[in-house]
Amino acid sequence: MATSQDTRAAVRAHYEPVIGLEVHVHLLTASKIFCSCSTRFGDPPNANVCPVCLGLPGALPVLNQQAVQFATLAAMALNCRINERSIFARKNYFYPDLPKGYQVSQYDKPLAEFGWIEVPATGGGAKKIGITRVHLEEDAGKSLHEGFPDSYDHTYLDLNRCGVPLIEIVSEPDLRSPEEAYEYLTRLKEIILYTGVSDCNMEEGSLRCDANISVRPAGQREFGTKTEIKNVNSFRFIRQALEYEIERHITVIESGGRIVQETRLFNSNEGKTYGMRSKEEAHDYRYFPEPDLLPLVVDAAWQRQIRALLPELPAARRARMMREYSLTEDDVYTLTRTQGMADQFEEAARAAKNPKRVANLVIGDLLGRLKAQGLEIEQSPISMKGVAMSADLVESGAISGKILKDLYDKAFERKEDFPAIYEKEKPRQITDTAAIEKMIDEVIAANPKQVEQYRAGKTTMKGFFVGQVMKASKGQANPALVNELLDKKLS
Amino acid sequence: MSDNRQPITEKDVLYVAELANLELTDEERARMVKDLNSILDYVDRLNELDTSNVEPMAQTSDRYGIDESKAGTARFAYAMREDKTGPSLPREVVMENAPETDGAFFKVPKVIEK
Amino acid sequence: MDISTLTIASARAAILERRTSAVALAESFYQKIEAADKQIGAFLTLTRERALAKAAQIDAIADKGDPLPPLAGVPIAIKDVMVMRGVRSTAGSKILSNFVAPYDCTAVARLEAAGAVVLGKTNCDEFAMGSSNENSGYYPVHNPRDLSRVPGGSSGGSAAAVAAGMSVAALGSDTGGSIRQPASFCGVVGLMPTYGRVSRYGLIAFASSLDHIGPLTKTVNDAAILLKHIAGRDPLDSTSAEVPVPDYEREIEKPVRGLRLGVPREYFGEGLDPEVRAAVEAAIQKMAQIGCEVVPISLPHTRYAVPTYYVIATAEASSNLARFDGVRYGYRSPQAGTLSEMYRRSRDQGFGAEAKRRIMLGTYVLSAGYYDAYYLKAQRVRALLTRDFEAAFQRVDAIVTPTSPTPAFKLGEKCDDPLAMYLADIYTVTADLAGVPGVSVPCGESKEGLPIGLQILGRHFDEGTVIRLAHVYERARSG
């Protein structure tokens, strides 16, 4: 008998979600896009404003060259075509944290278009998600609706953020599931972080995302009516909000209703979206070219200069690391989880004799211990140099795997780096023949049955004896010597 | 061609007034319908001209007073600035003109939003 | 000292030669303002403290025997659309009645740096929108030459202040003719430089691609002096041009013989008052006698200039005036219960009728469905109008026309018909749309004694030729 869940799944399978994402990213310039006020986050409210970003009468904008450079760099990292000539435009609407009553943005002649990034596709492989455009614009201020004694009827405004440079990255509606949307955002953030133009911090508001979602019967070409989801402050919540919204769309359509094109807000506590109660502002932005600014020209020469600043991007880096260090795809994703970790790993790997062993140590021994203590790679007591050193020691047989684990434990316990621990705790390897012989004698005496089996021809038993001797010596006996002496004693 | 224009109605005036955030009195609204229609009738004479091959001219600063010997980015480079911070207005000065403030923030009646 | 005949040059000389102190000079002007301005209404705010402090500074320098700055002690008036730090700056509007600017307009700062003494802020049509100064949110300005008539607009206060001897010179702004037309109505010189010649930083914006700051003075020489000090690249204004500033005081002394003057037939058609026509034609004849060559030309798209202007200017204005929302400065309606009410009532109560009309028109022509038919169309016609000038300037060095189709009309005469008012700009808006410089210089009077202005237009950044011609004509007329 079909459960209601099965029925739901069957219904759901008839529909295909169509998702597009608009991401706004703060550029890490020192000063604002059109004035010289500081962009520093966390300063006292309204401490970083001037006639220009305050929208005082008579003030005029002057474009920050670095903002253009950062925007272009990001667009290149997203495989966009850079338009040599682009135009700023005014987007006119009223909102208390928008001082001029318009936002200076770009409209029909944006800085960059026709880009793409790859995301892992459900079911394996990679899928290209189109990026329609990347353009420059200024941010608005912050409206605070609660937290003050009279918040029940007042909104407080902090305009420090007015004029901070943004790029808006608009994806094609190529995403087909909330999971894909999550992957897209993760990959996009990673790429932008690698370019260094933003710190992509959603908590601080330097990365924001709005989602557009519609559903259509599987196989249909036309898009359904879309709704927009705003005010979601983590990738996880965006995924969740999209899940909810897709269900909602399907439910409405299945029951014969029509989706209303509207903006909805996500309530993360309840996991639901709600239509905005306030009367929808007429979205007639009356775009027209900004008369106070000249056309923006990023010519071929400047583009070349900027392109030369592009670092190795994540996808290319992972491909190279797989080749260079003979790593699996899983390994390489783990090691490149953050740019910092990847940099440190490569530094260590290059210094060591066997990079693969370094990778294994990082993945196997280091990350686990870090996670257990809730530490980030940057807080690791064992530096990458230390890891490299330990790898080399194991490689040369100077220490065994077990000793290494002990040393790692001690390092984490005492919060000391590997070289220091090794100096203090390095096992004095037992190379004294007499001592080893004594241990062998003891082991032989304790295991007469196994001795018989060995002498009877079961040569594989040797491993048992080696193990026993190593155990007795707490792993400190020189393995080569143990082998040699065992041969003598057992024969 | 100028007879093709749809006259502005009171509904249009209401819509535009909303976009422009103006609460017109009844008198103003009626007056506005009359005035806008009269002006737009006059503006309609622009349709006598065939401008299909003419580029719109949004400003003069991008073509006059420009050093034509400079090409590409260099041509308008003078109108960009370096990424250097400068002094902001002291907050007390900023708030001097504020209709409502607690000294640190601007205050407005509540924005209705969930 | 008869301050009513003082020019910048003579005021400067009087102070240099210590025939008067800067403070005494400023005080004389304040006395004159006290006596005359009740009837005229040219000033909105007097900046006594600042003026006297500056004058005292100048006197201190002079007393020490140190070299004086070029405009030392010269009293000037500033149209209230230009902000001044610590001074109430209203743009002629009630919506800014309590706004004290925290920074200086660049053009004003340059004059003050050169030693000028700012007497006060002059009255104007609200946000520079008007041709008669009857749209001021405060009180209208009366033409000093006939108090029952308008001084012209929107820089009516500046023109009247200079014409009435209440200031030696003034700065005004011109978007559709607002320097030149009041200059012609009041019988003074009004110069609109090329767009981008003078920084707009600190000029409360009406129409960003059309706004200009320029001087209103008694003589062309004075206009040249002021232009010299306010012109030049300002890094705070992206549209401010990087063109070097010639010494305009030298430029005006250059000869005009052989210069070709274009006379466009479209500016001499119907609607032109016969007395204005007569005066202007006489002026052109005089120029011919001086040695200029008079060339009939055509600016064929002239009849489309006013509608073009009113689409573009109002569109830009509707956006520029959006910042007046009662949030951070300016008027906030006491009946502001909700945010929406705050916006709508503050703006409806704070703006006057003309400003609201233009905001509505501008919003409409930019709105979805109308942008192409109106705004984009107007910008294309603007290109055609500019081409007219480019073509004309292949054949002539300057263009001469009447400044206004009539002399000053009576107060209240055109108030009820906005369109009729707009048509008063018919000869001046073309220059704003194309960005070319223009000057209005007095060239006669009507039977009733009302001043008539001659307009001279020139190539982009060729203010030199324009003021040279005006200067020579001025000389010839008085000589």
Image (cartoon, coloured by chain):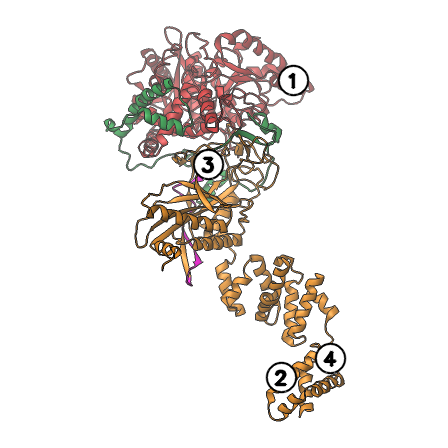
Whether residue C254 appears in this view of the structure is: no
Q: Closer to us: mark 1 or mark 4?
A: 4
Reading the image, the residue beneath label 1 is: C56
Reading the image, the residue beneath label 2 is: A463
Label of residue C448 in the image:
none
CA–CA distance in space, label 1 to label 2: 105 Å
Name chain A's colour. orange
* A115 up-or-down from C471: above or below: below
Q: In terms of secondary structure, where does tag 1 sit?
A: helix
Looking at the picture, how far across and down is residue A83, in whole percent?
Answer: 41, 47
Sequence-wise first label, 3 or 4: 3
Reading the image, the residue beneath label 4 is: A430
- Read off the magenta span: A105-125
Sequence-wise first label, 2 or 4: 4
Q: Is residue A166 left or right of residue C419?
A: right
Chain on which label 2 sits: A
